[in-house]
Image (cartoon, rainbow, N blue to C red):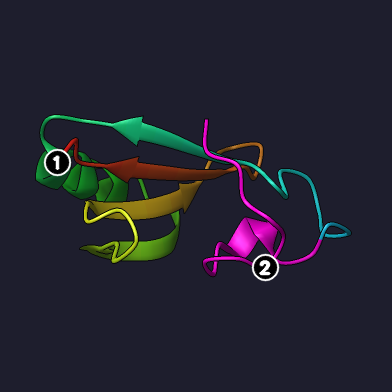
């Protein structure tokens, strides 16, 4: 668990406590083969919130999508 204050570190779901469902929560999944998961996500035509990039705060490569309930989900490497 990683707790943050509202509007800190530029997290899109932590910008305003009055926003829609899922606001204030980011689910992170750590995977072994990020490139494979990235390609699968693009083929599934999911709503991509952030393209594959290096997160300067964590030092990990990641991308973020919305799940079917509109929750923000980030998929990242373990290193």
Q: Is residue 8 above or below residue 13?
A: below
49 or 39: which is nearer to us? 49
One can see residue 46 in this view: no
Asked if the stretch drawn in magenta spans residue 35, the answer is: no
Residue linked to disc 1: 79
Q: Is residue 65 left or right of residue 10?
A: left
Q: Furthest-right residue in view? A: 18
Give residue 14's quadrant in the image. bottom right
Callout 2 crowding tier (Cα within 10 Å): few <14, some 14–19, many ≥20: few
- Which mark, residue 41? none
Residue linked to disc 2: 7
Q: Secondary structure at mark 2?
A: loop
Q: Secondary structure at mark 1?
A: loop
Q: Is residue 43 left or right of residue 7?
A: left
Q: Tell me where the magenta segment starts and ends, as one range.
A: 1-16
**Where does the image place residue 61, in percent across and percent down from the top left?**
20, 54
30 or 5: which is nearer to us? 5
On the rendered image, what quadrant is the C terminus found in? top left
- Kindly identify the residue that appears in the image at 66 percent across and 37 percent down: 69
**Where does the image place residue 17, in percent across and percent down from the top left?**
83, 57
């Amino acid at each position: 668990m990683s707790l943050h204050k509202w509007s800190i570190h530029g997290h899109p779901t932590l910008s305003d406590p009055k926003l829609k469902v899922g606001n204030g929560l980011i689910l992170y999944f750590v995977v072994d083969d990020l490139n494979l998961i990235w390609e699968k996500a693009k083929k599934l035509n999911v709503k991509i919130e952030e393209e594959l990039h290096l997160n300067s705060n964590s030092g990990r490569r990641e991308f973020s999508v919305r799940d079917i309930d509109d929750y923000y989900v980030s998929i990242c490497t373990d290193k």
